[in-house]
Amino acid sequence: MVKQSLPASTASSALTIYIPIHPQSTNKAMTRPVHQLILALLLTALVPAAHAYAEGVALTDMPPGVAAPEFTLQDHDGNTHKLSDYKGKVIVVNFWATWCPPCREEMPAMQRAWEVIQNENMMMLASDVGEDEDTVFEFTANYPVDFPLLMDRDSSVTRDWSVSGLPTTYIVDPDGNIVYRAIGGRAWDAPEMLDRLRALQTSKPR
């Protein structure tokens, strides 16, 4: 099978609520305060819409044969995670940041989904874009989660995965191919969403 490169992310629906990533804001710490202030001003009106859309369960099919880019990242507790270590599992790979309202909105649903799937040969990884451990640790005081929160400090993994806005989530099948993408928040704990993840455990490679 010929492996295809990962297509660039685009917001394909007017209902999708996601926050575009400024190309320089994810790798220079000194730009983050300004970035966060601008976002706070711009997104006040978007938070109610993000809340409404968090109930969505739509996933975008990816072309067959799109291999998930390998990465090795530490989580905010210092543990190392290599994507290929989880080959053979269905993997949910989420890209997010603490300053992103839709990311915060969907995080509790991700935790509830994780509580269901963690013993079902699935893995959930949420990669924070361009922040530090202290920032993520403070975030977990209000949004406690049990699945790994990875630290993509220089945003290199985010770029490799062609992420252009947050939150963006990819679903990787047991063979290591990306089969679905979600741009914007989703109700990851919805029964129909969990069933779609489970179906990948026994489906044939595309």
Image (cartoon, grey):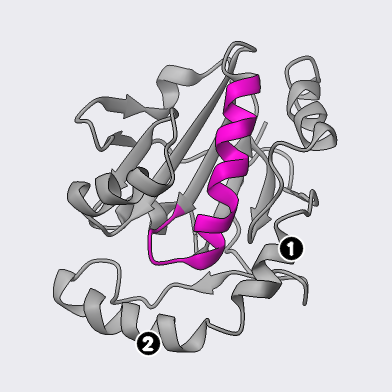
Q: Which mark is residue 19?
A: none
Amino acid carrying label 1: it is Tyr
The x, y position of residue 161, in whole percent, is 47, 52
Residue 67 located within the stretch drawn in magenta:
no
Report which residue position mark 1 lands on: 53
Q: Which residues are magenta?
A: 96-116
The x, y position of residue 115, in whole percent, is 59, 23
Q: Is 40 in front, or is 150?
A: 40
The x, y position of residue 63, in whole percent, is 73, 47
Res 121 → quadrant: top right
Q: Secondary structure at mark 1?
A: helix
Report which residue position mark 2 lands on: 38
Taken as a whole, is the magenta stretch helix, strand or loop?
helix
Give the total number of marks visible in the rendering: 2
Q: Is 156 in front, or is 151?
A: 151
The residue drawn where x is 71% and y is 36% is 189
The residue drawn where x is 24% and y is 54% is 135
Res 50 → quadrant: bottom right
